[in-house]
Every structure is written in structure tokens, then in C-alpha cells.
Amino acid sequence: MILSAITFPGLGLSIDIDPVAFSVFGKPIYWYGVIIALGFTLAATYGYLRAPKFGIESEKILDMLFCAVPAAIVCARAYYCIFYWELFRDDPIRCLYIWEGGIAIYGAVIGAVLAVVIYCKVTKQRIGPFVDIGGLGLLIGQCIGRWGNFVNQEAYGAVTDSVLRMGLANWMGEYSYFHPTFFYESAWNLLGFMILHGYSKHRRYDGEVFTLYVAWYGLGRAWIEGLRTDSLYLFSTGIRVSQLLAIVSCLAAVGLLVYVHTVKKPKRENLQVYSAEQKTNKEEENHESD
């Protein structure tokens, strides 16, 4: 069933979108899932192609994803269920019904990072290069994934009369106009990706790009979350969970960046990519001498 048209009166646009993209053997495939899958595919492809620039074998990115993706899904759902527990208290088994909707991006990020740390510890690899690649991939996935919220007519903000306002109809066909916060976050992530992609070629230490990602995303999310009407709250308080986490993580990341650059003063030659290149050159020299 097609939802009511989404309008952008300030831009002169009106868009009709059927949430169902197509059907397979009679089973509906929703645009939301298609868009999420597209974001994941592009993020994984980017990571695979750029891995050597971080001193990582491309195949290891795929190995890491086998660990990170399930952890991200589980934690994204758990994050949502914990802070919306009143919806699941009487029937906790519904926490497993992920197809009913209800996931949180911060939960996914936390789960993915924990999985990467465990993966690197078990395989005895540096964590920094993997989370650097992961941070850039997250920006791609989040940028594209937010358009799934657009199709579902969700994750919008408070009522506004700004030029960039999104019109949604209620069950009576009456329109109200809201901040398109899904678009704000998508644009913020796109800008962040372009900046950090360029800077990653000049990074000074492994893990710096991920720390910059945390600071950048936290800064934008802290503002955007304050505009939303569907925030998760810290239990019975009026504190928005994701906004609080965004502020704390942003400040922590900025503090860490300042500390490392002013106290540790890292040198680029210590990056894993240079260590990997030196190892390869040495192996080639040994092979030639044989």
C-alpha cells in the first residue's frame, strides 16, 4: 500500500513512494531493506578496496565483517529494546521479532566496534587500522541508510515552517510540516565522509580517523537528535539517550585527539601501512637474493 505523498512545499516537490520495492514468490521486499543492503554493500566495497592503504589485506575486511555485522544487528536491537522496555515488558520474546522494526544506530556502532576489537585481539592484529576503515564505512552506510527512514516516513523532527520542511499526512489526510531530520543526518554523514576520506591519506596514527568519526558524528547527532520527535529516553527521565551519548562521545573523542597530538606527538612512519610496505619490500629483497 502506498503511503500518502511526501511533500516538500519549499522545493515544490511531492513524492509518492510504495514501501514495497518488489515481491519474490509473493513475499514483499521493502525499500527499507533494499536501501540498508545497498548502504552495507557500498561500505563493504569501499573497505575492501581501501584496505591496503591502511596496511590491511583486503580479505581480512571480509573476515572482520562476518564478526561485526551480526554483533551490530544484535546490539542495535538490544539498545532499542532496553530503552523502550515498556513495549516488551509483558512479552519479552518480542525482542527477537526484529522484522517488526525497532533498531538504533548507536547500538549497531557499539556492537560493531566491540566485535572488531575482539576480532583483532583473537587474530593478533592492530585495532587502529580496522576501526579507521570501519568509521569511514559507517559514514557511507549511515548516509544511505537514512533514506530508508524517508521511505518509511519516520525519523523526522518537530513541526517547522522552514524552507526545507517535509509534509506528512495523518490518517485524515491533513498535512503537517516537519524538520526532515533523516536528510540532515544523511547530508552530515556525506560531508563527514568526504572530509575524512581526504584526511585519511594524511592521518598521523592508526585509529585517528575513527576518533575523528566519533567526534564528527557525535557533534551532528547531538544537534539533530534535539530536533527529533521519536527519541529514546533514559528510562523515566527527560534525557534523550542518543543525544547524551553523542555529546559525551564527541567530547571524549576531541579530548583524545588533543592529548595524542600534543602529548604523544605520533609520527606517520609508525602507521601500519608503512610497516606492511617495509615487510613486503624486505620479503621481496630476500626472495631476489635467493
Image (cartoon, rainbow, N blue to C red):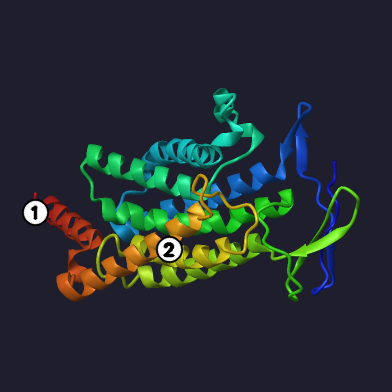
Residue type, numbered disc 1 = Ser
Residue ID at (83%, 67%):
13
Q: Quadrant of the N terminus?
A: top right
Q: Which one is in front, 53 or 23? A: 23
Q: Position of residue 28 (x, y in %)?
A: 75, 33
Is 143 placed left or right of 32 in the picture?
Answer: left
- Residue 16, position as x, y percentages in the image: 84, 54
Left or right of residue 195: residue 117: left
CA neighbours of label 2 inside 10 A, class few (<14), some (14 to 19), many (20+): some
CB within 8 Å, label 1 to label 2: no
> Who is closer to the viewer here, 85 or 105?
85
Q: Residue 125, percent across and down? A: 23, 46
In the rendered structure, the answer to whether residue 117 lies left or right of residue 241 reads left
Residue at x-position 16% and y-position 70%: 264
Residue under label 1, please give it.
289
Describe the element under mark 2 as helix, strand or loop. Answer: helix
Q: Amino acid at mark 2?
A: Ile
Sooner in the amino-acid sequence: mark 1 or mark 2: 2
| Closer to viewer: mark 1 or mark 2 | 2
Q: Nearer the viewer, residue 169 or 39?
A: 169
Where residue 103 sits in the image (x, y, percent)? 56, 42
Query: Vertically, is 31 above or below 50?
Result: above
235 sits left or right of 62 in the view: right
Q: Residue furthest front?
A: 236
Residue in the picture at 53% in, 50% down: 233
Query: What element does badge 1 sit on?
Result: helix
Label 1, label 2: how many angstroms apart (C-alpha)?
56 Å
**Residue identifier under label 2:** 247
Q: Residue at x 76, y 26 (%)?
A: 25
Q: Residues within 10 Å of mark 1 (few under 14, many from 20)?
A: few
